[in-house]
Amino acid sequence: MPGLGATFGRGAATSYQQDMANADCLLFMGSNMAEAHPVGFRWPMKAKEKGATLIHVDPRFSRTSALCDHYVNIRAGTDIAFLGGLVNYVLTEGKWFEEFVRAYTNAGVIIEEGFQDTEDLAGLFSGYNPADGTYDPQEGKWGYEPKADGEGTEGQGQKKNEGGQQGTHGYGIMGGAHPGAAPKTDPTLRHPRCVMQILKRHFARYTPEAVASVCGCSAEQVVKVAELLCGNSGRERTSTIVYAVGWTHHTTGVQIIRTAGILQLLLGNIGRPGGGIMAMRGHSSIQGSTDVSTLYDLLPGYLPQPTADEKHETLDRYVEAEGMPTGFWSNFRPMIVSLMKAWYGSAATPENDYGFGWLPRVDGDYSHLVTMDRMAKGEMTGYMVFGQNPAGGGMNAGLQRAGLRNLDWLVVADWFETETAVFWKDDPNAPPPKEIKTEVFFIPAAGSPEKEGTLTNTQRLLQWHNKAMDPPGDCRSDAWFVYQLGKKLKEQYAGSTDPRDLPLLNLTWEYDYTEEPKLPDGTTSRIHGEPDVERILQEVNGYKVAETDPRTGRPALLPGFWELKADGSTACGCWIYSGVFPEPGRNRANERKRTPGNPVEPEWGFAWPKNRRVLYNRASADPEGRPWSERKKLVWWDEAAGKWVGPDEPDFEPDKPPSYRAPKDAKGMAAIGGNQPFIMKPDGLGWLYAPKGVKDGPLPTHYEPIESPVGNTLYPERTSSPTTRLFDGPLNRVAHAPTSEFPVVACTFRLTEHYLSGPMSRFNSWLNELQPEMFVEMSRELAAERGVANGDWVTVRTARGAIECRALVTPRIGPLLVNGRTVHQVGLPFHWAFAGEVVGGNANDLTAILAEVNVSMHEGKAFACQVEAGRRDGKQPTATKKAVPWPTREPTPDTPTAAQPEGGFAHGQS
């Protein structure tokens, strides 16, 4: 996530879940952790037992709210305004951790003359091009003011600011785009163009009263939360911020996270026990899917996918464009060369650029939402879906189903016949099956206990899950399917002399077991052709190409990424995972050893990178290397030993003393001083102001959601984010803000009893009994206005369509006073659709396809709707039905129809 990357250098959670028990205060925003991550929520509860204060700021009073000390109700989509109010309080009241900020952030750096803020341009930054809705950072003078020749030495050697956004994605590598030449600084922080002064001016309008008017809370609540965070931050105390998709699923999602990063830097809560920002991931390996990587514009380890232009024409040009001369990304060439050697083996040579030319080139946006919009326009012929359900769980799911109807073929690998598998026959809003041309291939997939491999969780922790049993019947793991498909393709193209077939023919694809695998009971697996996933993990870990391990007769495994070379002598499938399998027989992801006396439990799984549990932990010590306090010590400089020590693996060069200062023209890590903790940034500092790294501005700004019943009271001339990509069309109508046609704010949420769009829960009768029916949560006031009683049928409409559901009338969601007028909001769980034992209205049929500019993220957490009493015209079935039995498993019992009782149990009593 570039919000974290642009601020700190890596787009991942800065700490680990158990560390939340060390917090003195926890702020949950964009997260209903008790409901969505109930196992991990034990750690905030442990903090509470020790006296910590828990705060929940959210549009709904939920199970998390009930367990927190303070709850603030805000309007969905106004998070930047609320966080901006906290930043403003910290700055105006002088509550920032001054020593931390002066030493470890770019607060004193002077920005180019000519930069104009949203305060100068009525909600826009300089460099905006209204013709295409994009910013040009060079034209806008976002960069640092360079030092004159000979003026100082520190930081020299950074790449010259040549303009444009660096990197394939435009936000650099993990948000690490270089800021330009060595900058001028003002140690006094008084220069009008230094970052601290720009920050103060930018957030000055976010007063408690202004924030309250936007968010619908009270000014006193804003101040109270600010006081709690400030009172629990500093030398002796730390606070944690926890977020999830309640922040990411917005057209301003990256900037919401940026605001949290700014706040935590100002309070000195990064790299320290009980501090940081916890990015709560959804599935068990969402983090791993981006690490390895399944994103169209990334290679494993967050290396950019090459683009189809001249700047990536050769390996040298690619490294020049994407690497950095200073900081850890100066190791870019060893990373990419080692990846090429892992993928292409002996075929990757210096003479052919290690096969760099065989990598596919990106020539456009192939993110999911853009792809589905393209599919709906008839521009695609085939699609393969593994463990995904776009027909039920995708934004504007109706449009995505229309896209599936345009395909020639579709392959779905899953446990159950999801909406995506049966869209051609069960979609109540679709044409008759005989009119749908798509040929659907449904592949029975193995369940979690029926396969093995690694999962990478919220805290970057790789954990191995062992296979317990063979899958039944013809079910196969995803790995089996992809491995066998790859083998078939290589066989089909064997002997080809066409240059375009070389990437496939030269691909290393040898992961067969050397002997038949055994099950836990000692019997031999009956599944033939399953790849040896440990061999894949060893390739991902990396090895020395020409050095053989005498214990195995195979190439010697690498102990970690620090041994990667640029000369082709090492191979590594994902540099950040290097060290997970450092020697034969030692799969660190499969280790489950307790370490008494060490709270980070370093022998329980493997956390990337280098098993560091708290990122940027050099910042837990002061510039001289001493802990800021004994109570919050984590790593520190041991002068006698000449190294950094502590319970965690230092996120720093282990033997670089705090006194080290970079000489003039230093390169690589030699350019990072011993007092600069953020090693993934080219200047070693946390970025309060991002000169590059995000496409929609160097500082966060409040914009209304694309669909909102109200305008932007903070920037009246600019309602919504000017960089959001829209896909207006007959299947994706958008009610642009402010809209009077749809006066109610809607947000989606999840329930503990169901999982995502429902494929893993709506086929389970027991879970259906716990949450039997789709509902909309609404306030008593809105229900009275609409003439609705608890349990009644209601219709919820948006510009895309309408669904019917039951009304859950509750005081847990209430009307808000926004800029002097009453605004209602409702909550919609997103677990129901037309497949499964229980069917119902699909909340994702109401949402729109919109794309945030940095990562193409949608805005499913804030949109505009209308709520009406009664069932919709041409109503679709909502009664309980029997599931289509899984052909080789015992079907679950039929679920009895259960009416929702009066009183509304559907989301827990409060």
Image: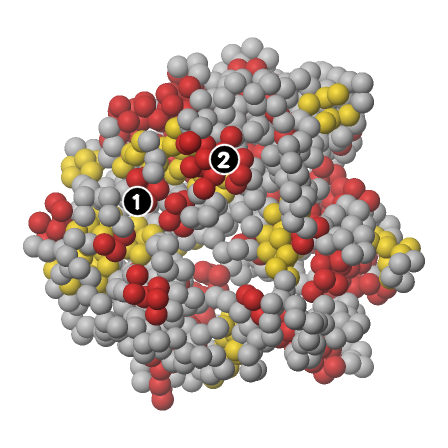
Residue 392 can be seen in this image: no
Q: As drawn, is 21 to the left or to the right of 708?
A: right
Q: Secondary structure at mark 2?
A: helix
Residue 321 horizontal/vertical position (percent): 69, 45
| Front residue of this view, candidates 154 and 835 | 835
Check whether the beta carbons of the residues at disc 1 and disc 2 lie within 8 A of each other: no
Q: How many marks?
A: 2
Residue 380 horizontal/vertical position (percent): 50, 73
Q: As drawn, is 36 to the left or to the right of 331?
A: left
Quarter occupied by residue 28: top left
**The label number, if any, that marks residue 688 in the structure image:** none
Residue at 90% across / 62% down in the picture? 553
Residue 572 horizontal/vertical position (percent): 76, 54
* Amino acid at pointer 1: Ser
Q: Residues within 10 Å of mark 1 (few under 14, many from 20)?
A: many
Residue 507 can be seen in this image: yes
Which residue does the numbered mark 2 point to in the structure image?
20
Residue at 86% across / 55% down in the picture? 556
* Amino acid at pointer 2: Met
Disc 1 to disc 2, C-alpha distance: 20 Å
Residue at 41% across / 78% down in the picture? 891
Which of the two labelled residues, at mark 1 and mark 2, occupies the earlier sequence position? 2
Which residue does the numbered mark 1 point to in the structure image?
62
Give the quarter of the figure containing the C terminus. top left
Residue 603 horizontal/vertical position (percent): 68, 44
| Front residue of this view, candidates 239 and 361 | 239
In this rendering, the answer to whether 453 lies above or below 230 is: below
Q: As drawn, is 305 to the left or to the right of 715?
A: right
